[in-house]
């Protein structure tokens, strides 16, 4: 929008060329100020390309080719020879399928159901997720968007969408979708981002059918590049 205003103002809007020059100079200065950034990885996995991915399995669901699905598993992204930068922004879109039980840990039968995202070994997400129903008599809460610990939130907190379930082997037949955006200080020319779950379901035979997860998108952006 600024560029459109700039073009219009410089071409037609201001009679005095001196005023026009000053206006354009100031506006151009505004456009050029701030940090620079560079997207170094951006995939919705539709092409089936698994370059830079380790442990990635692909499957097609809901008319999408995505990475997944996992139960007590995961994959990682490795990038190297990155240009200079001072921070990195990671945007991930995980799908949590079926009967995730959140922070439930009664008898260690069906939880806690944890999902972890790390950068170079540092936890950015280490949280429970819940697709459980929630009413005054029964509610399996989740820690997300907080780290797993002592504080919990209602199921689906901060989810951006729900989709149908996948396994169809329990009464919880839903997929919760999250868009997770994390920005951290980072200067190394290499980066490793890993995703994995620690699901618990001791009371079912088909664990993958009971609960699982996928990743439908991943974007890595460097900030303050040359
Ligand atoms: Ca569980």
Image (cartoon, rainbow, N blue to C red):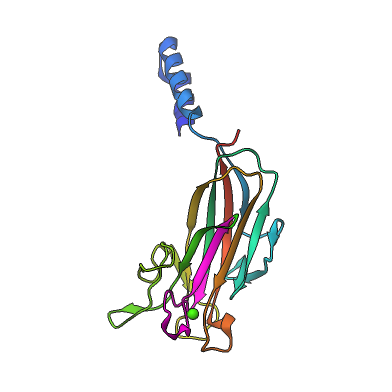
Residue drawn at x 54%, y 88% as measured from the top left: 204
Residue drawn at x 46%, y 14% as measured from the top left: 21
Of residues 221 and 177, the one drawn nearer to the viewer in this rendering: 221
* Figure quadrant of residue 130: bottom left
In the picture as drawn, the residue positioned furthest to the left comes out as 136
Of residues 26 and 183, the one drawn nearer to the viewer in this rendering: 183
Residue 139 % position (x, y):
35, 78
112 to 27, vertically: above or below: below
Residue drawn at x 58%, y 57% as measured from the top left: 121
Of residues 153 and 188, the one drawn nearer to the viewer in this rendering: 188
Residue 181 % position (x, y):
49, 54
* Highlighted range, magenta: 96-119
Residue 4 % position (x, y):
47, 30
Residue drawn at x 51%, y 34% as measured from the top left: 35
The answer to whether any part of residue 138 appears in the image is: yes
Is 52 on the left-hand or right-hand side of 86? right
The answer to whether any part of residue 49 appears in the image is: no
Is 46 on the left-hand or right-hand side of 139? right
Which quadrant is home to the C terminus?
top right
Which quadrant is home to the N terminus?
top left
Instruction: Give yes or no for residue 37 being in the magenta stretch.
Output: no
Residue 28 % position (x, y):
48, 24
189 to 165, vertically: above or below: above
């Amino acid at each position: 929008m600024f560029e459109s205003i700039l073009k219009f103002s410089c071409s037609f809007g201001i009679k005095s060329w001196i005023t026009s020059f000053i206006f354009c100079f100031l506006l151009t200065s505004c456009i050029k100020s701030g940090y620079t950034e560079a997207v170094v990885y951006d995939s919705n996995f539709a092409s089936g390309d698994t370059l830079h991915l380790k442990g990635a399995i692909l499957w097609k669901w809901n008319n999408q080719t995505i990475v997944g699905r996992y139960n007590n598993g995961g994959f990682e992204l490795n990038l190297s020879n990155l240009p200079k930068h001072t921070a990195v922004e990671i945007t991930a879109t995980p799908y949590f399928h079926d009967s995730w039980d959140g922070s439930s840990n009664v008898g260690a039968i069906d939880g806690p159901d944890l999902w972890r995202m790390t950068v170079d070994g540092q936890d950015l997400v280490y949280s429970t997720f819940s697709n459980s129903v929630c009413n005054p008599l029964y509610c399996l809460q989740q820690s997300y968007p907080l780290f797993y610990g002592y504080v919990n939130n209602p199921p689906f907190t901060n989810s951006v969408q729900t989709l149908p379930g996948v396994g169809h082997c329990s009464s919880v037949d839903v997929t919760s979708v999250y868009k997770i955006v994390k920005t951290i200080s980072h200067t190394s020319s290499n980066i490793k981002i890993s995703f994995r779950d620690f699901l618990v379901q001791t009371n079912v035979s088909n664990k993958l059918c009971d609960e699982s997860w996928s990743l439908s998108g991943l974007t890595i952006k460097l900030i303050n590049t040359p």
